[in-house]
Image (cartoon, helix red, strand yellow):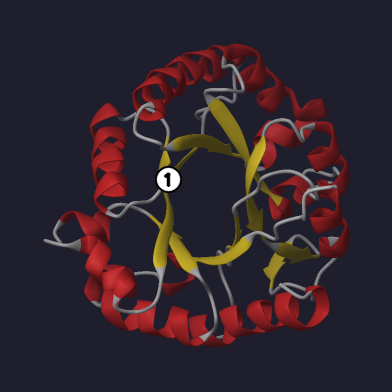
Amino acid sequence: MRAKYMKPKIGAQLIVWGERQAKDLGSVLKEVASLGYAGVEMGPGPLERLENPKELFTSNGLVLAALHVGVGDTRIAETCLQLLRRCDAHYLLFSGAGGRGNTEKEYRENSKFMRTIAEKSRDLDIRVCYHNHYQEIADGARGIKIICREVEPELLSLCVDTFWVQYAGASPVQFLKENLDRVSYLHLKDLKEKEFVELGQGVVDFPGVFKAIEGRKVEWAVVEQDRTKRTPKESMQISRLYLKEKLGL
């Protein structure tokens, strides 16, 4: 009998709440929970000074899905591993491997960095993923290909950001199909005329995205709204309702 397809849990990236994360993380998490999200992704800063960060998530009926940081800083990466352990969370996302120059040398050097962190994290039950922007997808996904060549799939997965794949002129659905053996995490983001819009209001084929990952263990699909003309709560509510009403997620 074929195993039942397990739908990803839907998370919220806190970037859209801006500085409120640092000033009043508790109220932000209450808003996230009220919208029906299962967990959150964020940077480590607001959690570092908390005595018991896990309790703040638990008290709001949430979990920490992942921490997301730029590549290259060992101290920050090790802080993230400690926080993930304290919160019983399992994903560490890196981005920016091409550096300012988007050169092969920078990709290779930062791939070595990710390999080192991934080797440490493997025994901690933490999965390291690389999150793409448009640079890595441009030119036939040159950047992603370098990263995947430099670091084995058992050490490094991909967090595919649908907006940036589309922005680079590629198909998120096709990109997922071509890299399915690497995909462990999703960033759900829509675009219209090169701008960020809420899910369902742009051109990304989200039904196709979820069809493409069927049978693949993708635990989290996280809504990331970098910018919006609405309030954070209004924006993230629109996207959450789209996933629930149109896709049954």
The amino acid type found where label 1 is placed reads His
Quadrant in the picture for the C terminus: bottom right
Q: Nearer the viewer, residue 8 or 110?
A: 8
Q: Position of residue 70 (x, y in %)?
A: 42, 39
Q: Is residue 217 visible?
A: yes
Q: Relative to 164, say whether 137 is above or below.
A: above
Residue 120 on image: x %, y %: 34, 23
Q: Which sits in the foreground, 37 or 198?
A: 37
Mark 1 is surrounded, within 10 Å at the Cα level, by few (under 14), some (14 to 19) or many (20 or more) other residues, namely: some
Residue at 27% x, 37% y is 76
Q: Quadrant of residue 223?
A: bottom right
Q: Is residue 64 left or right of residue 188?
A: left
Badge 1 marks a residue whose secondary structure is loop
> Is any part of residue 231 visible from this angle?
no
Q: Is residue 245 left or right of residue 96?
A: right
Coordinates of residue 247 in the picture (x, y in percent): 80, 73
Residue at 77% in and 35% down: 180
* Left or right: where 200 falls relative to 77: right
Residue 50, above or below 157: below
Give the image quarter of residue 202. Answer: bottom right
Q: Position of residue 90 (x, y in %)?
A: 42, 45
How many marks overall? 1
Q: Is residue 61 left or right of residue 16?
A: left
The residue where tag 1 is placed is: 90
Which of these two is toward me, 206 or 170?
206
Q: Residue at x 75, y 45 (%)?
A: 165
Q: Is residue 21 depicted above or below 97 in this figure?
A: below
Residue shown at 46% from the left, 79% from the top: 32
